[in-house]
Amino acid sequence: MTEVNVVVNVPTGQDGQDEQGGQDGEARAAGRHRARSPIISPGVQPALLTMALAGVFAATAPLDRWALLPALVVLQAVTAAGWFRLNGMWPARQGIALAFAGGLAADAALLLVVDEGQEPEALLAVLGVWFLLVLVLQLRHHGSADERLDSLTATAAATLLTGVATGYLAATAISGDAVAVTMCGVAAATWFAALRLPFVWPVLALGAAAGAGAIAEPLTDLGTDAMAFAAAGGVSALIGLRVASYDFPSRFVHFTAGVALPLTMAAPAAYLLGLALL
């Protein structure tokens, strides 16, 4: 009879402890990752892109609305894509295209307005029609009720944001210089927010925005109102950055929503301040 020897490797006490320790270490690392704050700032590179796009707005706004339009279209496209990705919906080509098309329709409506002061009515009319279109298209969605609700809210919100960005056309009709100074405030606040200096960075960001307005004051006809426009741009930029930083955002979110939302949020501020001060 042939004797068969079976050798079974049993971990020694030290080996078992090492293996268990490795598993515990991985578990602790995962726990630390989820326990940390879900707010992650976009950082320096997206801030540079925001500043570059703000520079294009500032350079073209004093010319006329048509000169501003190409930069606005880029902003609306990035806003639509970034909002869907921020909400965890990707790919979402139909929703992004629908929201972007809503922004383009709003642009066309404001450019075709003949009577000054009718821009809000034109924008609301376009958004009303577009929300109805979004609702009708969601009725064809074959997903669950939760999926339909998520898709509806994301598409409606993205459409609203692209429409909000259209406010730059209305603000430019009031004062191109005001839009340019607002962009200076957005750029300054975005840069100091990206540096994330301990404790005082929000104060420094807003101070830098107001300082940008003070520097731009002699270059425009706005007078002391320039600081108000720049400060409003700074506040709007910080709000947009906060939204784009939420819930462990990916790098794609940072380079879309993190770039666009600081600028998009400043559009109503530029328009409303223009109505109030100019």
Image (cartoon, rainbow, N blue to C red):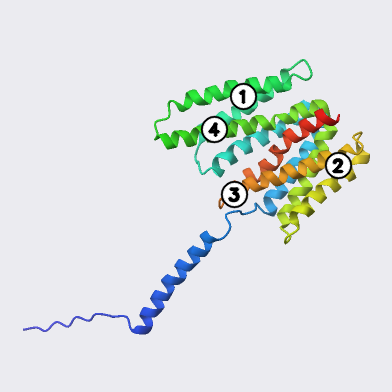
Q: Gap in Å between the C-alphas at discs 1 and 2?
A: 32 Å
Tag 3 near tag 2, CB within 8 Å: no
Graded by Cα atoms within 10 Å as few (under 14), some (14 to 19) or many (20 or more), the crowding at tag 4 reads many
The answer to whether 113 is drawn above or below residue 46 in the figure is above
State the SS at label 2: helix
Q: What residue does disc 3 label?
A: 246
Q: Residue beneath label 2, please?
A: 227
Q: For the N terminus, which image quadrant?
A: bottom left
Q: Residues within 10 Å of mark 1 (few under 14, many from 20)?
A: many
CA distance separating discs 3 and 1: 27 Å
Q: Earlier in the sequence, mark 3 or mark 2?
A: 2
Give the labeled residue for mark 4: 155
Q: Earlier in the sequence, mark 1 or mark 2?
A: 1
Question: As drawn, which residue projects farthest toward the front?
Answer: 276
Q: CA distance from mark 3 to mark 2?
A: 29 Å
Q: Which residue is tagged 1? A: 127
Q: Amino acid at mark 3?
A: Tyr
Q: Is residue 207 above or below residue 197?
A: above
